Structures are given as structure tokens and as C-alpha cells.
Image (spheres, rainbow, N blue to C red):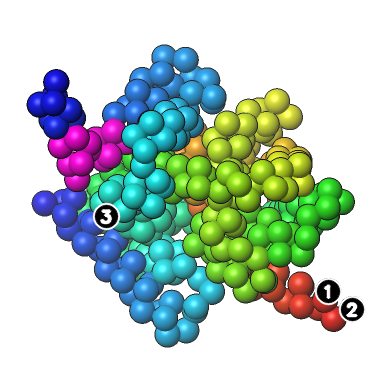
Amino acid sequence: MLLIKGLSWLILFQLIGTALNVLFLPFLPSAIIGMVLLVLFLRLRGQVSESIETASGGLLRFLPLLLTPPATGIMMYGSEIAADAAAILVSLTVSFILVVPLTGHLMQYLIKRQARREEA
Amino acid sequence: MNALMAAWSAVVAHPLFLIGLTLGVYQLGQALYERTRMALLHPLIVAIALLIPALWLLGLEYPAYRDAVFPLTMLLAPATVALGVPLYHNLRRIRQYFWPVMISLLVGGVFVTVLTILLAWLLGADFPMLMTLAPKSLTTPIAMVVADQLGGMAALAAGFVMYTAVLGALMGPWLLSVTGVTLPSARGMALGLAAHAVGTSRALEESEETGAFAALAMSLMGIGTALLLPLAVTLWLML
């Protein structure tokens, strides 16, 4: 029952997100709006109920499985990619390889600097 | 022989066949990954690498597969909402690191978007292709909306998002480790910003804190790009 109850909460926030997406925020996906609303809701309540904890833990454990079908969609675009293969592969791959360490190091540096300042 | 063929066709045509196949290859990937801990054998990568040839052998197009496994994909929406839980658990830390998060987001986000466009432009891609490549770090639904707004191709943008996802699963944590990024919050920030939901999923494997920062980075990167990139492109075209 806990799982069902928690899942109902998550679906409720998803649906409120869908309504807000149509009404006010066409550029944001409904699930992202739902996630922000869930954080606000938990913040107001001051705790995470056992049901929401159970349902979210269960779903997040299978996140890679849930992402498998959309990721398989990469097979649809063979011919478009072939036409501009060099530009596409180089720009996507090189920018990814550079941005990961850049962002990680910058964040790590800024956090350590902030920690040092707080100590001082 | 005919009876066997008929039985095989019935099995393949069953509504649960492709769901079963997906669960099967995923578990195979999971088992391989647990044995070896090699990023190349991440369940997501193994599943895609086995599913694509399997669908091809079965003579199935992707839309047919996508429709058949809709019950699985449907859970992606509540799973995205569920990311709010690790976010909430780490809210105190996120607020404590407000400026590091905002600065890393701005620098990383602008860097990856500009570099992608610049490299593709240097290699001869035309304007619609550039606008299709630009939102590749975003989560699929935002990327498709943004590509469409900019005059790119939404469906192809989703393909680039998925290619980025594969890169993220394959190399994301490894790139951070070899370059010496050890703080969980910094690792999460980089993974969520560069590789959206798949990066976040990989980050959650490391720790809840890593996952929370990845979910945060993914959301802020999506929201920020959706708001600022169309504005930036419009201003640039006016010059």
C-alpha cells in the first residue's frame, strides 16, 4: 500500500505540472514542474513521508531501465547523422569531454574556496 | 515446422514480448556490470547495444518498439518527479553552495553550448543543424521544445540528446575521476549539467548527495537554457 500511496502523490504532482505547463509554462516539461512542486511541498511539510520515500526510491533505482526505450531511439536518425557525421560527432563528443571536467573542477574549486573563507 | 513458425510469430507479436526483451537485456547488462564494474558495460549501454540489432533482426522500426514499451516509458514522468526527494534531502547543502552552483551552471552551460555550435559551424554544419545540436545537454522534452523554437529539428535533437546520454553513461564518472574531481556535489553538478537524466542516474549510483546535485544541475540547465538560448540566438541574428 505504501508504494501505491507514494506513487499516487508523484502522479498527482506530475498532473499538476501538466496543468501548469499548459496554463503558464509552455517551455518547461511538466515532469520538471512536478519535481519543483514536490520539493516545495516537502519543504512545507518539513519531512518526507514513508510512502513518498518508498515510491521514489523504488522508481529511481530503475531509472536507467526507464531511460532505455528513449535512448534506443538513437537508431532512428542514422541517415541524418551520416550526412553531417563529422560536424555532429566532433561537436557533441569534444564539447562533452571538455565540459565535464571543467564544470566539476570549477564547482570543486568554488566550494573549497567558500569553505576556506568560512573558516577564516 | 509451420507450427513452430506460427508459435514464434505469436510470441513476437504478443504485447509483452518487447517489454520482456527490454527487461531481459537490461538484466543481462546489470549482471555484467555488477561483475565487471566497467562503464562500457553499464546496463543502459548493454541494453541499447543488444536492442538495436535485435529490433533490426526482427524487422521492427523504432516507433513500433516505442509504442510497445510505452508502459515502461510512462513511469519516466513520476520518476522525474521523484528526483524531488533527493533534492529535498540535500536542500540545506544546496542552499549553502548557492553561489558555486550558480557560477558553475552559468560557466559550464554557456561553455558547452557555445563550443558545440562553434565546432559544428567550423566543420560545415548549416544553421538548422546548429540549432538542433545546441540543446544536446538538456533533458529530452526541453531539448525538443528548444530546438523547435530555434528553427532546428526536434526529433533529431532528441537523437543528439541520446547520443550525449550514451557518452555520459560511458565516460562521465570516469572523466571526473581521472581529472581529480572528488567532491560528490561537484561530480553531481558536472554529470547533471552535461548529461541530463542519464548523468543524474549515474550520479545516484555514487551517492544521494551526488544524485541531488545532478538533479539540480539537470533542472537548472534545462530551465536556464530554455529561457536564455532563444533570447541569445535572436540577439545574435539581429547583429
Kindly identify which residue carries mark 2: B239
Tags 3 and 2 touching, CB below 8 Å: no
Q: Is residue B178 left or right of residue A42?
A: right
Residue B202 within the magenta-colored segment of the rendering: no
Q: Are marks 1 and 2 in contact (CB under 8 Å)?
A: yes
Instruction: Work out which residue is located at the far right of the displayed protein and give it.
Output: B239
Task: State yes or no: residue B13 in magenta.
Answer: yes
Q: Which residue is mark 1?
A: B236
Amino acid type assigned to the residue bearing label 3 in the image: Ile
**Left or right: B158 as drawn, with respect to B119:** left
Q: Position of residue A111 (x, y in %)?
A: 69, 47
Q: Position of residue A72 (x, y in %)?
A: 45, 42
**Quadrant location of the C terminus of chain B?**
bottom right
Using the image as rendered, state which of residue A76 and residue A65 is in the foreground. A76
Q: Residue at x 50, y 42 (%)?
A: A75
Task: Identify which amino acid the numbered label 1 is placed on.
Answer: Trp
Query: In the picture shown, does residue B158 fall above or below A31?
Result: above
Q: CA distance from mark 1 to mark 2?
A: 5 Å
Q: Three-letter amino acid code at disc 2?
A: Leu
| Residue that numbered label 3 is attached to | A52
Side (left or right) of A98 relative to B145: right
x then y, percent, for residue B127: 76, 64
Please state the chain letter of the residue tagged with numbered disc 2 in the rendered image: B
Q: Are marks 3 and 2 on the same chain?
A: no
- Helix, strand or loop: magenta stretch: helix
**Residue B29 horizontal/vertical position (percent):** 39, 25
Q: Which residues are magenta?
A: B9-22
Q: Residue at x 49, y 79 (%)?
A: A25
Residue mark closest to the camera, 1 vs 3 = 1
